[in-house]
Image: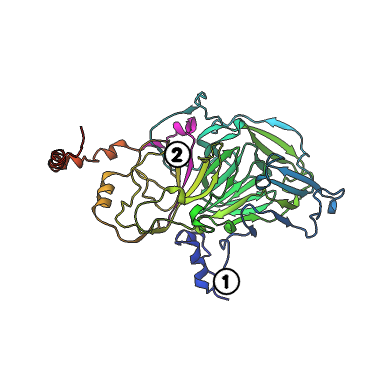
Amino acid sequence: MPTQQLSDPQDYQKIFHWAETQKNGTIPSFATRKNDPYKYMPGFNNHFESEAVPGTIPHGQNSPRSVRFGLYAEQMTASAFVAPRHVNKKAWLYRARPAVAHQGFVDLPDKEDTESNFLPINKRVHVSPTQLAWHPLEVPEGNDVDFVTGLKTIAGSGDPTLREGIATHVFLCNKSMEKSAFVNSDGDYCIVPQQGALDIQTEFGHMYVQPGEICVIQRGQRFKVKIEGPTRGYILEIWGSNFELPELGPLGANGLANPRDFLHPVAAYEISHDDPWEVVYKLGGKYFKSTQRHSPFDVVAWHGNYVPYKYDLTKFVNVGSISVDHIDPSIFCVLTAKSRDPTAPLADILTFQPRWDVASHTYRPPYYHRNVASELMGLIYGGYDGRSDGFAPGSISFECGMVPHGVAYEQFKEASASDPPVMRISEGSIAFMFESSRPFTITDYAWNSTAQHEHEPKMWDNLVNNFSKHAEEVEKILNNAAANGINGHD
């Protein structure tokens, strides 16, 4: 058998696209990175079934009088019972002990660095038209901080109790969760690791998620995060909606994020007897704790379409202009979430990574623009030239809707001087954007952070008025137009 390739996780940060891992068919193809210890099932929004012990799932019914091995049947319903079939979300779990077996709930102290109410009447959030940015936030040292205690909220819109809204967070942790699980009862998490891999245990099985990959854990699904060292990343949380693939329209059946590249865990149970576990719940932005004397991950088999999943961003199939001009950044959309406005999504997740840039007679950098979307951007690895100032991996950049942004004059002048060659851009880099039709407010944590800085407005001071240099030529054109009865300006 040929020598296995790309065994080092860093190798995946150097490839142009996942297609390179196939080595032009000279080695057996593989669907996951070589250091990923788990197996998965492919397909987006499929109805799956998985058994850790063959012959466990009952067929022809969901809840028989007696499940094999004395297991309990438990349904997780994630949509209204009468929701149309194509959006009806559920899963049946066959487990050693049901989730109801716990010892009650206890209030936990408020986490001052997290937020869920982004309405301007909340004095803990701030409205600002200023382009804001944050240098990479430091992973704590000295104190033990796991995934849950390391959550920090940056910005968002709405409130989870209104069942429509969005929150953006970072996680900064240096310790694995032990005998504890977390469940977000407010909404869905899209988790984007930036530094360090996440070994995630869920009720449905395990996922190993590395920088360059993302995962989605949906509302009500319990999970536990194990890490391997100082770990940092980003989270997009949505309320009242679920992530789905964007429509392809004229693209047809293929392109962007293909459904078969989304991977779902397979059943893997953990049984413990009289072993105390702690389950932390987030509900309405508040935190609660319950204890139980069995593992929350004792699911032997399951079936359904409400399942966590992950996706490798290096598999994204970019599309773009092959003649002139830019296509709108919606072509970089990996996942979207609908809002109550049929013309504007609640949230989009965009990816910017290695691709060809070929448009002729075209200003290649991001053009100066104002748009209705709120944009929160991060860099997973490599470099990115589309921001207005220095942008390192782990950084955050934010613009609220209708705030103008674009590059400095030096970049404008260089890009306007001559046609650049056909070239590959963003090599060795993956950046992402959380984009929303909703206006964001900024949390106290982010507003007061020492890592926060403004995009320096002086960088645009030398955007010179080139038009006035042509005043004599323009005046001749206008005089000639007036003489010939052609309207110019008043």
Secondary structure beneath label 1? loop
Quadrant of the image for the N terminus?
A: bottom right
Q: Position of residue 162 (x, y in %)?
A: 60, 30
Secondary structure beneath label 2? loop
Q: Is residue 141 visible?
A: no
Hey, which quadrant is residue 221 in on the image? Answer: top right
Q: CA distance from mark 2 to mark 1?
A: 43 Å
Instruction: Please check the rendered image and state whether residue 461 is part of the magenta-colored stretch, yes or no.
Output: no
**Circle number at residue 105:** none
Q: Indicate left or right for 468 with 287 as reference.
A: left
**Circle number at residue 373:** 2
- Magenta segment boundaries in residue numbering: 428-454
Q: Position of residue 177 (x, y in %)?
A: 63, 45
Using a 10 Å C-alpha cutoff, classify the residue at mark 2 as few (fewer than 14 neighbours), some (14 to 19) or many (20 or more).
many
Q: Which residue matches tag 1?
A: 28
Instruction: Please check the rendered image and state whether residue 452 is part of the magenta-colored stretch, yes or no.
Output: yes
Q: Position of residue 358 (x, y in %)?
A: 35, 59
Residue at 25% x, 55% y is: 418
